[in-house]
Image (cartoon, rainbow, N blue to C red):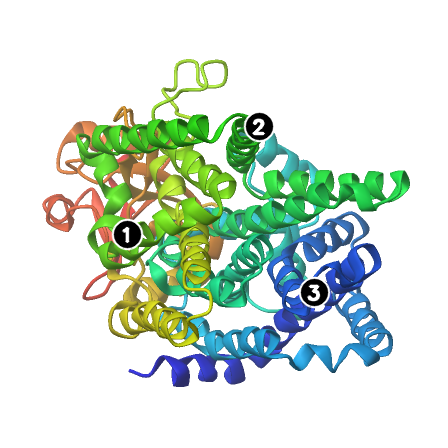
Amino acid sequence: MNPWLDGLTVLTSEWRLTLPILLGAFASQALIVLFLESFFGDRLAASERLALAVGGWTLPLLLLSLLWYFTGWNGLFWILPAALILLLLFRLRTDLKPAVRLPSLFLVLFLFLSLPLRLAYASRTALPLYFDSAQHYLVIKTILLENPSILWNWLSASYYHFGFHFLAAFIAAGTGAEIARVMLILGQVILLLIPFSVFFIVRHETNSEAAGGFALLLAAFGWYMPAHAVNWGKYPALMSAGMLAWLWGMTLIVFRQRSAFSRAKRRTLYLVLAVCAALTVLTHSRSLIVLGIVILASAMSAWLEQCSRRWMHAALFVTAAVVIWLGWLASRQSLLTLLFDPYLVKGISITALVLLLFAFAWMAFPRFTFVCLTSIALLLGSLFLPPTILSVGRGWTLLDRPFVEMILFLPLSVLGGLGLAGLEKRLHGRFLWRAAIILLAAGWVVVRAVFGYDLYPSDCCVIVGNDDVTAMDWMAKQLPPEAHIGIASTQLNVLPNEILEGDVGADAGVWITPLTGRAATLIPFNVDFSQPAALDSLCRAGISHLFIGERGQTFDRSLLDLRPEWYRPLLSMPETTVYEVAGCDK
């Protein structure tokens, strides 16, 4: 098993998809570089411009995808990126020399070395994992139908995370690639480029390239989050995490340097921030909560900075106590205990390293350290606070456990970078000591990643097997279009109050509608089909077939076989079976 070789295989064998995605990302980054140069000039270091451009690549492409949807012109995918690349080569010819400075070279090397590692994920699965992915597939397919009324029905009924889907549909339309492969590869490219915004935040705050690089490593490979979220099909949340990090960094430089701009330029920058915030919320609605958390934490920090140092210290201890208390509360609930698995179980050594560096972060950068710690406290608190107006009768909380679990890496990575920069300051003038500590800290993250970081799909979330794929193909060809298929379901529970959020697909049956176009209805996986009541409910619902998948929580085949006069197997394979419901005619 060689991730680099597997990733290079994906890169070369699917170049008709990977190359356009990378080309689009590069063109988007070129546009951001031009924007940063025109507004900030030399006030940003070359590595900062590069990192901010790389981290924000989804935003221009998402805007372009919305334009594509409302114009229907597939040529947008190719013509505009090509024009931007030509403009970049013409406009930035004199900027090639600074781009080869060591920090920028490090970022470029990190990018190209990490790319095959991330793409290795797509070499081991034909379909994205978990039940969420099937829903994403169906939304993207709906967008490609170019029927606004259908899309509006989705929006008004139950679904609202559309940013990722517009971008994926845009790429699928421009390249002609299969939707599932677009989702898999686009998801890995998004994951690859998120850490660059973290580099920018730390580099700009500390003026330390080493601290920025360390934060980059932490965000990329320090913990198994956010990468594991791909196994849950959390593509919109993952994309929004990258956009949130970019928006955080961009907001820093806009407000800190706003006095250097004319009123017209300030208004333009504020408009850019507002549009990017709207796109982030379009990508995942709960990003609005995270934006509010960061704004509140920043406002509290700014107010405390105007008070005495004693007030700042007191606020730090109170906030730390709140974090510990909320962590204790979460640990007492079996569902929320999973929140700490990436950080206090499997990633405990990396989190311990960040905690060791925390004191140095506080001494050197108290304001920004307080922002990070307060953000962690508010993220944890959001797991217990219901938005009463929006959640009447549903028991929701502001954020759910999986979202908080995957977003915590952001403040932790920034804290780690701040801590290393603070330690650098303490060791000022002692070059060898400073270099040794930087190498040890970064080396430990790399060693942990080499021996403990999983780059491939997790078995926990695979619900589609080889027999399932064969069965889907058979159903698409053999079953009538009006076939109505019953599929296994289970109940979803990710809220701390243990209120169930509803039924979700429990096996590969969730892919039947997206891949075959046949209607599917969720049925609890533990239904006893040998009972007349079960048959009666199937007949009343108009269900003509039942699907038993290879993996996940499937129907009990033995119960169906007890009633051969009711359920007739049409397709029988070692792990997957399709039954016809024949008992309704008797």
Toward the viewer: 496 or 98?
Answer: 98
Crowding around mark 1 (Cα neighbors within 10 Å: few <14, some 14 to 19, many 20+) is many
- The reply to whether dot 3 and dot 1 touch (C-beta < 8 Å) is no
Q: Is residue 133 above or below residue 173?
A: above
Q: Is the Cβ of the residue at disc 3 closer than 8 Å to that at disc 2?
A: no
Mark 1 is on which residue type?
Pro
Marks 3 and 2, Cα distance to the nearest angstrom? 38 Å
Amino acid at circle 2: Gln
Where disc 1 sits, the SS reads helix
Question: What whole-number distance in Å separates the C-alpha atoms at marks 1 and 2?
Answer: 36 Å
Residue 306 is tagged as 2
Crowdedness near tag 2: few (<14), some (14–19) or many (≥20) residues, C-alpha within 10 Å: few
Indicate the quadrant containing the N terminus: top left, top right, bottom left or bottom right: bottom left
- Residue density around tag 3, few if under 14, some if 14–19, many if 20 or more, within 10 Å: many
- Residue with the mark numbered 1: 342
Q: Would residue 320 be visible to someone looking at this image?
A: yes
Q: Residue drawn at (58%, 36%), measured in percent from left and top?
A: 154
Check disc 3 and report the residue beneath it. 29
| Position in image of residue 413 (x %, y %) | 42, 54
Seen from the viewer's position, the closer of residues 519 and 148 is 148
Quarter holding residue 475: bottom left
The disc, 1 or 2, on the residue closer to the chain's N-terminal end is 2
Q: Is residue 89 above or below residue 561?
A: below
Q: Position of residue 48 (x, y in %)?
A: 64, 63
Relative placement, left or right, of 311 versus 87 is left
Q: CA distance from mark 3 to mark 1?
A: 31 Å
Which mark is nearer the camera, 3 or 2? 2
Which residue occupies the foreground of this view, 339 or 518? 339
Point 62% across, 72% down: residue = 22
Q: Quadrant of residue 274?
A: top right
User: Relative to 451, is 121 on the left or the right?
Assistant: right
